[in-house]
Amino acid sequence: MLRIGRGVCGRALAVTLAASLAIACTHGRPFVRGPAHEPPPRPDAIDHRILLIGDAGDPREDGEPGMEVLEQQVRLLPDRTTVVFLGDNVYETGMPPPSELEGTPVEEILDEALFTLFEGRRDAERRVKAQVKAVDVPGVRAIFVAGNHDWDQFGIGGWERVREFERYLEQLS
């Protein structure tokens, strides 16, 4: 069993481990290493665990099974769980800055007329809230890593989209 120390070195190791494993994480359900017949470890035998999830930025509006499974998992050992969101947290073009149109009838008309061509702030907030809700359990830590979609697919305004995402997360906490 991998043990991660406490403090700055432990956090750095956890982030490094998460980043190095990001490429290999392609599971749609919880992945536990070891033979299927091997029972899971007892909760008191687990010092800390890291749950990795990627491409969570396009949750269904009627509920996202992946977020529901994540929430179930974080509730098992909240004080000993860190969740790392591995990017693409806000599809398709990251977190747009707030506009004067947000929440007005004009925005609703634009959303209806242009469908997904106009990704509004309200929809981006809905996407982020679904992820935050899944880890909003006392004791759980969450780390959000920006992916290419969060950077507006590396467009000219990508840096501002990532900064806006950061501001929005801070506002939620």
Image (cartoon, rainbow, N blue to C red):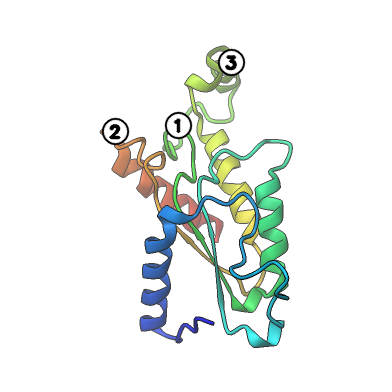
Q: Residue at x 69, y 59 (%)?
A: 71
- Residue 115 falls in image quadrant: top right
Q: For residue 75, which numbered disc appears in the image?
A: none
Residue extending farthest left: 156
Q: Earlier in the sequence, mark 2 or mark 3?
A: 3
Q: Amino acid at mark 2?
A: Gly
Q: CA distance from mark 2 to mark 3?
A: 26 Å
Q: What secondary structure is marked by label 2?
A: loop
Above or below 12: residue 148:
above
Give the x, y percent position of residue 31: 61, 61
Q: Residue at x 54, y 82 (%)?
A: 1
Q: Determine whether, in the image, residue 60 is placed left or right of residue 95.
A: right
Q: Earlier in the sequence, mark 1 or mark 2?
A: 1
Tell us which disc is closer to us: 1 or 3: 3
Q: CA distance from mark 1 to mark 2?
A: 19 Å
Q: Amino acid at mark 3?
A: Ile
Query: What is the quadrant of the C terminus in the image?
Result: bottom right
Q: Nearer the viewer, residue 33 or 11?
A: 33
Give the x, y percent position of residue 16: 36, 69
- Residue 20 falls in image quadrant: bottom left
Tell us which disc is closer to us: 1 or 2: 2
Q: For residue 155, which numbered disc appears in the image?
A: 2
Q: Residue at x 59, y 30 (%)?
A: 103
In this figure, which residue is indicated by the disc labeled 3? 109
Q: Earlier in the sequence, mark 1 or mark 3?
A: 1
Q: Nearer the viewer, residue 160 or 26?
A: 26
Q: Residue at x 64, y 62 (%)?
A: 136
Q: CA distance from mark 1 to mark 3?
A: 15 Å
Q: What secondary structure is marked by label 1?
A: loop
Query: Do residues under tags 1 and 2 come within 8 Å of each other at their CB atoms?
Result: no
Q: For residue 99, which numbered disc appears in the image?
A: 1
